[in-house]
Every structure is written in structure tokens, then in C-alpha cells.
Image (cartoon, rainbow, N blue to C red):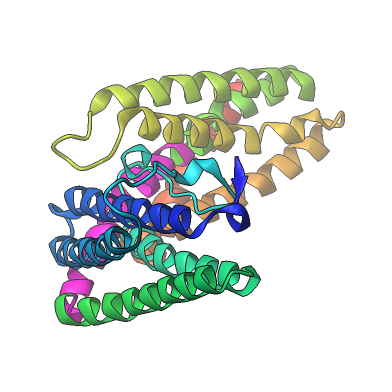
Amino acid sequence: MRNFSELSEREVLALAIGNEEEDNRIYNDLVERMREDYPSTAKVFSEMAAEETEHRHKLLDLYREKFGEHIPLVRRQDVRGFLHRKPVWQMPKPNIEDVRLLAESMESETRRFYRLAASKATDVSVRKLLGDLAEAEQEHEHRADELTEENLTARARRSEDATARRSFLLQYVQPGLVGLMDGSVSTLAPIFAAAFSTGHPHAAFIVGLAASIGAGISMGFAEALSDDGSLTGRGAPILRGAITGVMTTLGGLGHTLPFLIPTLWTALSVAFCVVIVELAAISWVRWKYMDTSPVRAGLQVALGGALVFATGVLIGNG
């Protein structure tokens, strides 16, 4: 690899041409990924891709004028410290705000890089070329703002933000909440039944550990196999199943770990306090993300938790 400062004017110009071409393809990839759910944002990226094509043509004209038809293959990965773009095709289903920030960072990073390189260049022609490229990227940023104002109206942004929120709820919050509720509530009965029936905290810990991990595996597979996400928009089944499984396990482990305390009643008291915190957290998530009133969410979760807890106590003392 070579340092950017070691490149000749011809190589810098070839690198700039390749850079503009890759950015154009990135924008077009984003258009394809966003077209269905975020049409207004996709239109913005489509016009920005056209802007990149126009700038590339200008660079090509300048290159032909100075160096002829042959353009050496100078790639980003061959230049030490040059810009690196994450391949869009490797990204999961894009988040609307992350994609908008990606577009902004692409232009600003390129502009800053060219300006820094221009400030360190000793050759006058290279300095001028890098300065011109920095100005071109500045124009890109202004044009991006203009395109956003033209195409992404307040109504369109609200609509796309609502779509993004719905996707976030379906793909992350809902499976996580299902897992947390199952792990926190369903494991109460076996853990407290074991504690009261044996009188030994360690026995309750073993039962809780097995129940938490077992429930996590079961819930993870059940969620992953229930829906492939192609029609419901609930996202990749493997990711959704992993979220559900992990949250189920964590929900059970929360009130299992206190039974590492050797004194039974101390362990029971700490575990009971942990259960209250878990149920309060579930109620808050339901209120925050699932449009459930705080009183209703609290009553529903508390009632379910109380019934399962009572079941464990009754069986343990039976």
C-alpha cells in the first residue's frame, strides 16, 4: 500500500474518479434498498447518485485533457488511510436515520480528507486538484440538503419515521419483550417452588439456571420458526429468535442469581426485589413502545407475575 501523499497528480485524479464511481453505486444500492418502504428518501438518493455521475464525467473530461484515455487502476484499498465504505449489500434491513447519516458522512468525510491532503501537499498542481475536489464535495453536501428539502417533505418524513418505528418495534422490541416476559414470569414458579420445598438456595439456583437456559432455547427456536418475516416485515428470523432467546434467558437469570446467596431468606428477599424490578421494567416497555397505558400495563404484568409466584409458593409448601 502507498501513502496518499506519495501519489502523483495523475494517480490522485484516477483515485478521485474511482471514488466518485463507487459512491454513485452506493447511492444506487441505497435506492434499491429503500424504494419500497421509504420512497421519498430513495428519490433523494437517486438524484444524489445522478450528481455523483455528473461530477465523475467532469473528472473524466479533465483527466482526458491532461493524461489521455488510459486511467490507471488506483483503488481505495491500495491507498493507506483512504476512505472506507461499508458495503451496502452487507448491511441488514436499513434503518432510515442510519442511512441518512451514512449519506451525510460520505460527503463530509470525503471533503475533509481532500482538504487535509491538500494542506499537506507540496506540489502546487496536486494542491490545486485536491482543493478543487474538496470544493466539489462541499457542493455535494449543499446539493444533498437541497434535494432533501425538495423531496423529503415534513409529511413524507413523518410517514417514513412511522414506518421505521414500526419496523423497530416488530424486529427488536416485540421479540425482546416476549422473551423478557416469558423468562421473568414463567420461571418464577419452579424457582420459588424449589426454594420453599428444599430449603436450600443452591437447589433453587440449579432449577432456575436450567429453567432459564431451557426456556431461552425453546423460545428462541419457537420465535425463529414462527415467521420468516417476508410478509409481516418482522425481520430476519434468526436475529429475531436470538433476541427472544437471549431476553428469555436474562429474564430468568435475574431472579435466579440471588439464590447464590447461602442464606435462604436473604436470597428470597433479594430475588423478590429483583422480580419487582423486572415486572416494572416490562410494564415500562409496554407503556413506552406498545401504546399501553401505564396503569393497565402495570396491572396486567403484576397480576400475571403474582399468580405465577403464588403458584410456586403453594407448590413449594405443599
- The quarter in which the N terminus is drawn is top right
* Location of residue 156 in the rendering, given as x and y in whole percent from the top left corner: 16, 73
Residue 145 percent coordinates (x, y): 29, 79
With respect to residue 123, does 18 lie above or below?
A: above
Residue 156 lies in magenta, yes or no?
Answer: yes
* Horizontal side, residue 138 vs residue 79: left or right: left
Who is closer to the viewer here, 175 or 107? 107
Q: Where is residue 285 in the image (x, y as percent from the top left)?
A: 44, 56
Q: Main secondary structure of the magenta part?
A: helix
Residue 280 visible from this viewpoint:
yes
Please give the name of the residue rendered at 38% of the width and 45% of the height, measured from the top-left corner.
172
- Answer with left or right where residue 37 lies relative to residue 114: left
260 or 147: nearer the eye? 147
Q: Is residue 199 magenta?
A: no
Extent of the magenta region: 152-180
Residue 250 vs 150, above or below: the answer is: above
